[in-house]
Image (cartoon, rainbow, N blue to C red):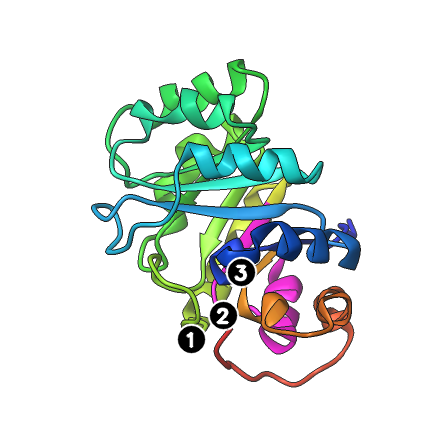
Amino acid sequence: MKRKILIAPSILAADFSALETEIKRIEKAGADMVHIDVMDGHFVPNITIGPLVVSGIRKITKLPLDVHLMIEDPGKYIDEFKKAGSDIITLHAESKGDVKRLLSRIKSSGIKAGISIRPKNSVDLIKWYLKDVDMVLLMTVEPGFGGQKFMSEVIPKIRHLRSIYDKDIEVDGGINKETAKEVIEAGANVLVAGTFIFGNKDAKQAIRDLRESACNGPKDHRRR
């Protein structure tokens, strides 16, 4: 089945001094959603944003907010991120707490739930949750910082996941028009890209390049 390719620009690479302008720019450029990385300095070695910023973004755009919780104990914050206006909340299988119960809590609140794993971990780690989620996010870099090099060893995991899972498969890390070709061919259909979009003066062309990358382009694992 041919799936629509969805583009989710990661605001981790946006200019936070002009965040409203940046979000309006990707909205006009044809983005399908806004990807928001939440980091707590414990689960990953970086600290980013919290519910207040998500709430502010919700006021700026009607695009779905795709919120990725890279935090140690997500159960403490799910309700806050839901109230802030998240449309999708993705948890890590490696997080603390009863992940299955947390996913159920997200779904019962009326929004979509996703599950993610670090690049080094096997898809087997999330098989238990596949019936409970609307999306699986496979990291193609080690989570924590933007601008990292794409990890090609994740490609077989995308292919394997697609053979057992028929909903959205999202990839995040080092995505450009060359690596996008590889992940789309492997079965991914939701692409998170930061610098490739926000660092491009023509965001519309960047998004178009990602959508069309499955049809052409050599392999080239460059930085996002």
Callout 1–callout 2 Cβ contact below 8 Å: yes
Segment colored magenta: 169-190
Please state which of residues 82 and 210 is positioned toward the viewer in this rendering. Answer: 82
Work out how far the residue at label 2 is from the one at label 3, CA to CA, in angstroms. 15 Å
The secondary element bearing badge 3 is classed as: loop
Mark toward the start of the polypeptide (1 vs 3): 3
Residue 181 vertical placement versus 32 (above, below): below
Callout 1–callout 3 Cβ contact below 8 Å: no
Q: Residues within 10 Å of mark 3 (few under 14, many from 20)?
A: some
Q: Nearer the viewer, mark 2 or mark 3?
A: 3
Horizontal and vertical percent position of residue 123: 41, 48
Work out how far the residue at label 1 is from the one at label 3, CA to CA, in angstroms. 18 Å
Mark toward the start of the polypeptide (2 vs 3): 3
Residue 167 vertical placement versus 162 (above, below): above
Farthest residue to the left: give it.
42
Is residue 105 visible in the rendered image? The answer is yes
| Residue found at x 50% / y 40% | 67
The amino acid pointed to by label 3 is Ala
Q: Is residue 183 magenta?
A: yes
Is residue 188 visible in the rendered image? The answer is no
Please state which of residues 39 and 92 is positioned toward the viewer in this rendering. Answer: 39
Count of picture labels: 3
Residue 114 vertical placement versus 98 (above, below): below
The amino acid pointed to by label 2 is Gly
Q: Which mark identifies residue 174?
A: 2
Please state which of residues 116 and 68 is positioned toward the viewer in this rendering. Answer: 68
| Residue found at x 52% / y 49% | 161
Residue 72 vertical placement versus 104 (above, below): below
- Residue of label 3: 14
- Residue of label 1: 149
The amino acid pointed to by label 1 is Lys
Horizontal and vertical percent position of residue 177: 65, 74
